[in-house]
Image (cartoon, grey):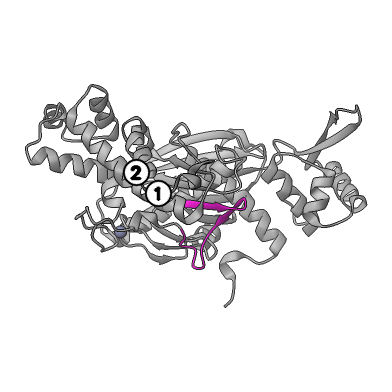
Amino acid sequence: MTPALTKDELSIIRIIFMQDEATRSEIASHLGTSLIKVSSLLESLEKNGFIYKEERRTKRGRPSYMFRIVKDRFYAIGISFGIDSFRLAVTNTAKDIIHEEEFPFKTDESDKKHIQSVVNTLEKIIRQATEIPAAKDLTPVSVGVSLPGMVDTEKGVWILGLQIGGVENIPLARILEERTGVPVFIEDAARTYAFYEKIVGAGKALKNFVLLYLDRGIGTGIVINHELYLGSGGLSGEIGHIIHQNNAYRCACGSIGCLETVTSSSGIIRVFMDRLNEGVISHLKEELRNSGELSLEAIREAAEKGDRLAITTLFETGQFLGDACALLIKLFNPQAIIIDGHCAILKDFFQGAINQQIRHQVIPEMIKHFEIMYPPYNQFTEAHGAALFAVERLLKRAVDKTPSYKIKR
Ligand SMILES: [Zn+2]
């Protein structure tokens, strides 16, 4: 974006970016301004190469125009940080990925050094992403970083890492922005997924939905009236830490019995391993003896081959998740719960239990027009979502003129 753009022009770009395309009257109604004023703003944006129009014929044969953003006008950088890897997705104005890459990450250092190393690696990846050939001669407009644990999106502060030790109120957005010179926005992993599904994925047409994120942690992204709900301190949707009576595992948050301890990727593996160590028979015992490691893919493969332990473990995972879904339906009455993240690759073995728990616990009227969606899992979805929210937040910040992490109380 160039500083020469006015607040109204940036607002128009934001509307078109969010919707993919928009008509003159849609824009006028969003801005609450006249068609004449919108026409002149659109004309100026078109002249400066930000947008273009496409003619559409209405049923009566009258031409109407759809406005879109020029595909290669700018690009954005999205990075997701897992426990053992970083994933990078670079997107163009059309929201498509033009470059994706994975960076394995491992350090055996103390918590403090480990976090320094996370920050340094993020800086390195951002610098690297500004030099990719696909974005030659363009400047990145902004960077989005999706993180595990708890994130205050508004302030750009990584509050807690939970499974990642040593994170305590790190002003990560500001640090990275100062080091790279590019605007940086950070977000919690579950909300990044929710944003992705709302903008380009399964939730695009939905007004109210909950994204249930099943990965290294468990969380939700809550979309109400087409907007992501952040909560007063930016900590909405921490369903991974609801406590279940039938669960005795201690969580990284300090409580006992959190949903995350049995339904996250490491949780599922841990439950399976504990049963195995108690002497329950499984095909995977031999494989474990050879490789020493267990993956979600191996558990899925064993379940597909009829392994009783794998099937029961995943059914029980489904029961826990079903209880959580029933709670979400009762709280939010959503049109859908979209289940995504690495653990969703096991859906064939837990969806029966999820449906069963919902049927048992929810009044039928509440689920009359409700569905559970399982979009195909892609390991770059999170980074892609991070690049998309980075653009949206940048436009919002420019329109609001209040750099979010500098808000004074
Ligand atoms: Zn917890």
Mark toward the start of the polypeptide (1 vs 2): 1
Give the amino acid at mark 1.
Ala
- Nearer to us in this view, 289 or 298: 298
Q: Residue pushed farthest left?
A: 279
Could you say whether the residue bearing mark 1 is in a helix, strand or loop?
helix
Could you say whether the residue bearing mark 2 is in a helix, strand or loop?
helix
Q: Quadrant of the C terminus?
A: bottom right
Q: Is residue 376 visible?
A: yes
Q: Is residue 215 visible?
A: no
Count of marks overlaid on the render: 2
Residue drawn at x 79%, y 40% is 51
Judge left or right: residue 275 versus residue 153.
left
Give the amino acid at mark 2.
Gln
> In the rendering, which numbered label is found on residue 326?
1
Image height of 339 relative to 238, above or below: above
- Which residue in the protein does label 2 denote? 357
Within 10 angstroms of label 2, few (less than 14), some, or many (20 or more) residues? many
Distance between mark 1 and mark 2 Cα atoms: 7 Å
Q: Residue pushed farthest bottom?
A: 409
Q: Position of residue 339 (x, y in %)?
A: 44, 41
Quadrant where ligand 1 appears: bottom left
Contact between labelled residues 2 and 1, with CB atoms less than 8 Å apart: yes
Q: Position of residue 302 (x, y in %)?
A: 23, 26
- What segment is highlighted magenta in the picture? 221-236
Image height of 185 relative to 305, above or below: below
Residue drawn at x 67%, y 57% is 396
**Residue 224 magenta:** yes
- Nearer to us in this view, 122 or 280: 280
> In the rendering, which numbered label is found on residue 7?
none
**Residue 166 magenta:** no
Within 10 angstroms of label 1, few (less than 14), some, or many (20 or more) residues? many
Judge left or right: residue 304 versus residue 194.
left
